[in-house]
Amino acid sequence: MRNVLESMSDRERRDLLQGALADLFPHSHDDGLWTWIEEMWPEKMVYRRGEDLFEVTYDIDDEKKVSMGVPVEVTAVRVYRPIESLQRVYSNLIYELGKRNASADKKRINAIIALSKELLSSEPADAEE
């Protein structure tokens, strides 16, 4: 199987497996169940039939015929884990943006102070009576 798989593209392998599933579960308009591949690995796949998910091992022989093991019903679990290198990049980026904004804010505040001083110094002094 290894030599056959190595010579096949992912699309060709997926098409062979999808064809084997179609032979095993022909679509009938009566039952309304479709069967398709959700995920694939070199020696197993997960397919969906209607709302149910199944994992099954498979083998592709030298003549590109597919044989499958006994399917096991499974459930999908999605896991999110932090990617430390991205956290570091984003942390540095946020820090740098904060420094730039603080610098820009400082310039704006200094400009406002200078304009305020100019306005105050240009006002005529109150005449003493």
Image: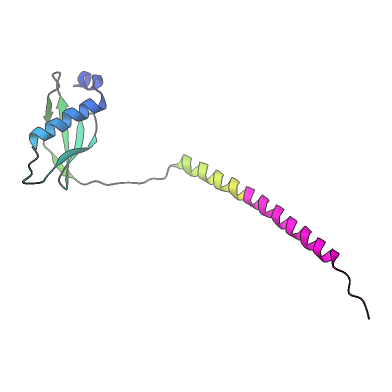
Q: Describe residue 95's horizontal placement relative to residue 29 as left or right.
A: right
Q: In the depicted view, which residue is nearer to us: 109 or 61?
A: 109
- The residue nearer to you, when weighing 114 against 16, is 114
In the rendered view, tell whether residue 82 sits above or below residue 119: above
Q: Quadrant of the N terminus?
A: top left
The dominant secondary structure in magenta is: helix
Quarter of the figure that contains the C terminus: bottom right
The residue at the far right in this view is 129
**Outermost residue to the bottom:** 129
User: How many numbered marks have been drawn onto this rendered protein structure?
Assistant: 0
Question: Quarter-wise, where is residue 57 in the image?
Answer: top left
Magenta stretch: residue 118 in it? yes
Residue beneath the point at 89% across and 74% down: 126
Image quarter of residue 11: top left
- The residue that appears at 5% across and 46% down in the rendered structure is 30
Can residue 69 be spotted in the picture? no
With 83 as the anchor, is 118 left or right in this view? Answer: right
Residue 50: % across, % down: 15, 46
Residue 125 position by quadrant: bottom right
Residue 47 highlighted magenta (yes or no): no
Q: Which residue corresponds to the image point at 67% horizontal and 54% vertical from the top-left?
A: 105
The magenta stretch is 100-129
Q: Position of residue 32 (x, y in %)?
A: 10, 46
Residue 64 visible in the shown view: yes
Q: Is residue 28 left or right of residue 16?
A: left
Observer-nearest residue: 117 or 17?
A: 117
| Residue 87, horizontal then vertical, whole percent | 48, 44
Please give the name of the residue rendered at 12% of the width and 31% of the height, measured from the top-left corner: 20
Where is residue 68 shown, x and y percent of the image?
12, 31
39 is higher (above) or lower (below) than 123: above
Relative side of 109 to 46, left or right: right
38 up-or-down from 126: above or below: above
